[in-house]
């Protein structure tokens, strides 16, 4: 198996799942749903309410007795999954539709699988397991990144709101967005969080302030003929 990922799973990250996870963990917290040393089963055993040992049970029909060795089922000779391809290119490894496959790495994986004598089924199982693991690692990385960005966004917004002129600047920014904004721009500002970036906020607020100037040409608030650049940069010649 190659050391580097065979594939990378794309797609946008969704909000974290709050349902029960592996090991029976649910909304009550990590490990609360698992069988611990202080869990419900341990308490029942201490109170003597556990069921008494009924002794060994007779094997069900078709089951062997204790100590009997059951021969493993042999795959059918005509099962394609049980065969080792004649050459590495003969492996047909399938991935999820959204998975982006690194063809060079996949070729290396096939060559290694063929060298080890893995069957088609064994190779597919290993590839699927690795694909799932890579997906989980990437999902965790995206969640960590989003959490970090969320923290930074709160710090940005706290800085913006600390300005004594915040209310007026916010009104000006809304004026600019009503005049020149669009749903697409709003979506990008939310996705990138730039809508809370102090420098960008100040810029949009300044645009709105210029629009509110009585002498701004086309502002609808006066008959002046000053251009946007003249209002934004009054010292510019």
Image (spheres, helix red, strand yellow):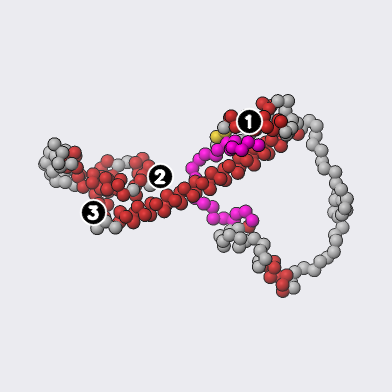
Q: Is residue 197 left or right of residue 112?
A: left
Asked whether the beta carbons under mark 1 and mark 2 sit within 8 Å of each other, the answer is no
Is residue 14 one of those drawn in magenta? yes
Q: Is residue 105 left or right of residue 116?
A: left
Q: Earlier in the sequence, mark 2 or mark 3?
A: 3
Residue range of the region highlighted in magenta in the rendering:
1-23
Of helix, strand and loop, which one carries label 3?
helix
Residue assigned mark 2: 191
Q: Is residue 27 left or right of residue 186?
A: right
Which residue is painted at 58% across and 59% down in the image? 30
Nearer-the-camera pick, 175 or 135: 135
Of helix, strand and loop, which one carries label 2?
helix
Q: CA distance from mark 2 to mark 3?
A: 25 Å
**Residue 108 — which label?**
1
Tell how many labels. Answer: 3
**Residue 168 — which label?**
3
**Looking at the image, residue 88 lies above or below residue 183:** above
Q: CA distance from mark 1 to mark 2?
A: 37 Å
Which residue is painted at 81% across and 38% down in the image? 74
Which residue is painted at 59% across and 37% down in the image? 4
Residue 61 visible (yes or no): no
């Amino acid at each position: 198996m190659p050391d580097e990922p065979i594939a990378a799973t794309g797609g946008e990250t969704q909000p974290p799942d709050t349902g029960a996870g592996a090991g029976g963990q649910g909304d009550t917290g990590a490990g609360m749903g698992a069988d611990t040393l202080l869990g419900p089963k341990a308490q029942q055993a201490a109170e003597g309410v556990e069921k008494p040992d009924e002794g060994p049970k007779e094997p069900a029909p078709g089951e062997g007795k204790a100590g009997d060795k059951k021969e493993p089922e042999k795959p059918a000779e005509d099962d394609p999954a049980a065969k080792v391809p004649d050459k590495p290119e003969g492996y047909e490894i399938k991935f999820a539709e959204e998975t982006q496959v690194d063809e060079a790495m996949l070729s290396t994986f096939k060559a290694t699988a063929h060298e080890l004598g893995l069957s088609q089924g064994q190779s597919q199982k290993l590839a699927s397991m690795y694909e799932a693991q890579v997906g989980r690692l990437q999902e965790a990385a995206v969640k960590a990144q989003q959490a970090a960005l969320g923290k930074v966004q709160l710090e940005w917004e706290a800085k913006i709101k600390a300005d004594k002129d915040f209310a007026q600047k916010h009104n000006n920014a809304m004026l600019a967005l009503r005049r020149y904004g669009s749903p697409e721009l709003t979506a990008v500002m939310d996705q990138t969080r730039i809508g809370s970036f102090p420098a960008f906020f100040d810029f949009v607020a300044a645009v709105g302030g210029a629009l509110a100037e009585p002498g701004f040409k086309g502002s609808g608030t006066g008959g002046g003929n000053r251009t946007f650049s003249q209002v934004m940069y009054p010292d510019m010649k």
